[in-house]
């Protein structure tokens, strides 16, 4: 029982330890691993500018490859758009032809053919909608690719701008370091030169002092020697004379041994006198010994000073040689620093050239992109600006078809009523005859019955006559509405043509700007980008050629001489033709958000027979009514 709490505590500790081992972050003594520290940034002057430029060039090359891939994507989108536009133009022509054929089939009462043509028109309209949706998706993809291209070009320009800035910072730092080192070196060398100059002056002064002191010592020594010589001149001369006499006496002693004894005394006397002279000379020398000793000491000191001066001069010469070596080393270091700074300057020049080249290329591509964006905006504006007129024209065409169908239906009903009126007229003639026969035969009951039938027949005849007149009035109103719609359609056609002319003039100007931008960007383009620009240039030139052919413009987009009057006459003729035609509505085709006037004229011409057919039906019904009335009158 006593051990149980301890065991429980040990179990808790073991469980805590296992938890701490499984989850080291909860242990108070275990710290999470530190994130790796980024390497310390180099000083600006220590940056390897050439390697940095090479790395930037490699990164720019990678971005250029991505840009080329986007150019290839845009080239594919352009070709797909050209294919869609060609197919869309073909579909619009097919739709116009199918509408004309449907109008002819409806006028000829070939309803099965008209129904099949209606199904074909629905299929064509569905395909046109698919192409329009694909065109919108293609434009969105092209715009996204253009945005990504602009971002890549901006990144390239930013990379080179950063590289130029880094190179300039490196150059400034290197120039500062070189200037600081040069200043320090110059200060050091100036201090060394000052110290060497001071040492030279000191040694020169010391040499002059030593020379003066040496000269003074030499003069003093000469004076002392002269004084000694002056003082010892008499004893010296006497000593020399006595020495000579001693030598002579010695010779005489040697020659005259016999006179040795006599001369020995003289010799001893001479020796004594020599000793006396030597003592006198010794006394003089003893008296001048201290001065000579001092002179000798000074001579030794002077010699030591000369040795020290020679050593100092040798040290000065060595220091001067070291100073010259330091000057050469400083010059070599300055030359190396100049090369160091020159490498940064060359890197800056290289980076500046690359930045300028990429900047010019980016500006040219940006100009092309701006021109493309202007064209896309113009297409959107064109679609928006022509949408209401196109919708109104479509509604008017639908109303014209409705009016034409109503006219045909009402005229058919009127014709049926006319035939019924003829039948009723025949019945009335027959019943009048029966009534007269019954009355003449005194069959009054039968005559009354026939009279009642005649009244009922007359009421039916009047009702059918009123219905026929009402149908003919409605048909005439429908024909008037159809004629009004025809005139409104002609007005819309003129408005559309005017709007399209103005929009095409703006588009022509934008196309010229687009071509100028592409021609400016082509010399610096390569690979897929050059192919894309050439494809765009060809497409733009073809579009401008189509606009010139449509409106009779010259290269500058102005109306050519002789073309203005012709285009105005054609427009007036089309307007008058459209106003005079009151049949089925004309078709309106637009390719790439642009109205094509020749297509409108073709559809108007194709749908014109339906109007003539309805007028022929009305004329036939009128003739039928006249003939029925004449027959009824004759029968009466």
Image (tube, grey):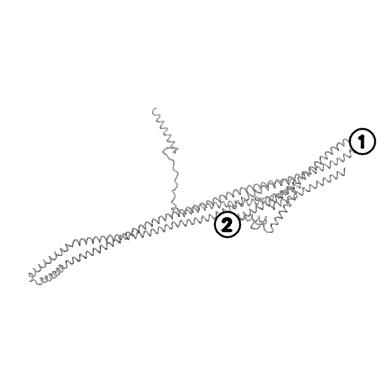
Q: Which of marks 1 and 2 is in front?
A: 2
523 to 585, vertically: above or below: below
443 to 121, vertically: above or below: above
Task: Tell whether 235 sits left or right of 344.
Answer: left
Give coordinates of residue 447: x percent, y percent: 89, 36
Question: What secondary structure is found at the residue carrying circle 2?
Answer: helix
Identify residue for label 1.
442
Residue drawn at the location 48% of the way across and 56% of the way down: 348
Task: Give the total of numbered labels.
Answer: 2
Q: Which of 616 and 504 is in front in this view?
A: 504
Give coordinates of residue 528: x percent, y percent: 57, 54
Answer whether residue 604 is visible to the viewer in this image: yes
Q: Which of marks 1 and 2 is nearer the N terminus?
A: 1
Identify residue for label 2.
520
Dot 1: few (<14), some (14–19), or many (≥20) neighbours within 10 Å?
few
446 to 287, vertically: above or below: above
Q: Residue furthest top?
A: 1
Please identify the quadrant where the C terminus is shown: top right
Give coordinates of residue 254: x percent, y percent: 10, 71
Q: Which of 78 and 356 is in front in this view?
A: 356
Quadrant of res 196: bottom left
Answer whether residue 124 is visible to the viewer in this image: no
Q: Which residue lies furthest to the right in this view?
A: 441
Residue drawn at the location 26% of the way across and 60% of the way down: 305
The Cα–Cα distance between marks 1 and 2, rounded to whole angstroms, is: 112 Å
Dot 2: few (<14), some (14–19), or many (≥20) neighbours within 10 Å?
some
Give coordinates of residue 609: x percent, y percent: 75, 50
Is disc 1 in contact with disc 2, using a CB cutoff of under 8 Å?
A: no
Q: Nearer the viewer, residue 123 or 236?
A: 236
Question: What secondary structure is found at the residue carrying circle 1?
Answer: loop
Please identify the quadrant where the N terminus is shown: top left
């Amino acid at each position: 029982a006593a051990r149980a709490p301890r065991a429980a505590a040990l179990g808790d500790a073991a469980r805590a330890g296992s938890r701490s081992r499984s989850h080291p972050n909860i242990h108070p003594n275990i710290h999470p691993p530190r994130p790796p520290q980024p390497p310390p940034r180099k000083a600006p002057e220590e940056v390897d500018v050439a390697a940095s430029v090479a790395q930037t060039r490699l990164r720019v090359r990678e971005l250029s490859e991505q840009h080329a891939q986007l150019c290839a994507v845009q080239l594919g989108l352009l070709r797909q758009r050209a294919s869609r536009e060609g197919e869309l133009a073909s579909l619009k022509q097919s739709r116009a032809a199918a509408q004309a054929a449907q109008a002819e089939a409806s006028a000829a009462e070939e309803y099965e053919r008209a129904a099949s043509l209606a199904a074909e028109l629905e299929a064509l309209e569905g395909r046109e909608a698919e192409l329009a949706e694909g065109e919108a998706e293609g434009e969105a993809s092209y715009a996204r690719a253009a945005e990504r291209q602009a971002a890549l070009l901006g990144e390239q320009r930013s990379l080179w701008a950063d590289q130029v800035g880094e190179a300039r910072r490196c150059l400034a730092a290197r120039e500062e370091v070189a200037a600081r080192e040069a200043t320090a070196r110059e200060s050091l060398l100036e201090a060394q030169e000052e110290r060497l100059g001071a040492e030279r002056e000191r040694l020169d002064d010391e040499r002059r002092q030593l020379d003066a002191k040496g000269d003074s010592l030499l003069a003093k020594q000469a004076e002392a020697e002269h004084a000694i010589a002056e003082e010892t001149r008499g004893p010296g001369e006497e000593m020399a004379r006595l020495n000579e006499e001693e030598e002579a006496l010695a010779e005489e002693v040697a020659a005259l041994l016999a006179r040795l004894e006599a001369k020995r005394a003289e010799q001893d006397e001479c020796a004594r006198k020599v000793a006396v002279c030597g003592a006198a000379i010794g006394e003089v020398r003893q008296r001048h010994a201290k001065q000579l000793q001092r002179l000798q000491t000074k001579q030794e000191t002077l010699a030591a000073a000369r040795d020290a001066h020679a050593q100092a001069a040798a040290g000065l010469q060595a220091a001067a040689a070291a100073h010259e070596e330091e000057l050469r080393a400083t010059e070599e270091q300055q030359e190396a620093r100049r090369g160091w700074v020159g490498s940064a300057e060359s890197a800056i020049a290289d980076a500046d050239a690359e930045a300028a080249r990429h900047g010019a290329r980016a500006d040219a591509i940006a100009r092309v992109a701006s021109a493309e964006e202007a064209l896309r905006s113009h297409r959107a504006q064109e679609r928006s600006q022509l949408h209401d007129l196109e919708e109104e024209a479509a509604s008017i065409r639908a109303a014209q078809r409705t009016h034409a169908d109503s006219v045909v239906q009402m005229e058919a009903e009127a014709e049926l009523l006319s035939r019924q009126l003829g039948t009723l007229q025949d019945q009335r003639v027959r019943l009048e005859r029966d009534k007269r026969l019954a009355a003449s035969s005194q069959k009054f009951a039968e005559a009354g019955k026939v009279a009642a039938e005649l009244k009922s027949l007359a009421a039916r005849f009047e009702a059918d006559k009123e219905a026929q007149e009402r149908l003919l009035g409605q048909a005439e109103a429908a024909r008037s509405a159809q004629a009004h719609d025809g005139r409104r359609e002609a007005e819309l056609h003129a408005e559309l043509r005017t709007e399209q002319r103005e929009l095409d003039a703006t588009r022509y100007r934008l196309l010229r700007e687009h071509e100028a931008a592409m021609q400016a960007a082509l010399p610096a383009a390569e690979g897929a980008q050059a192919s894309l620009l050439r494809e765009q240039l060809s497409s733009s030139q073809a579009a401008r050629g189509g606009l010139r052919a449509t409106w009779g413009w010259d290269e500058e987009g102005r109306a050519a001489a002789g073309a203005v009057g012709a285009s105005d006459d054609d427009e007036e003729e089309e307007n008058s033709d459209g106003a005079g035609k009151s049949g089925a509505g004309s078709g309106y085709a637009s390719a790439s958000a642009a109205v094509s006037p020749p297509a409108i004229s073709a559809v108007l011409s194709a749908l014109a027979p339906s109007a003539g057919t309805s007028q022929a039906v009305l004329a036939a019904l009128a003739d039928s009514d006249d003939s029925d009335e004449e027959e009824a009158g004759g029968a009466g």
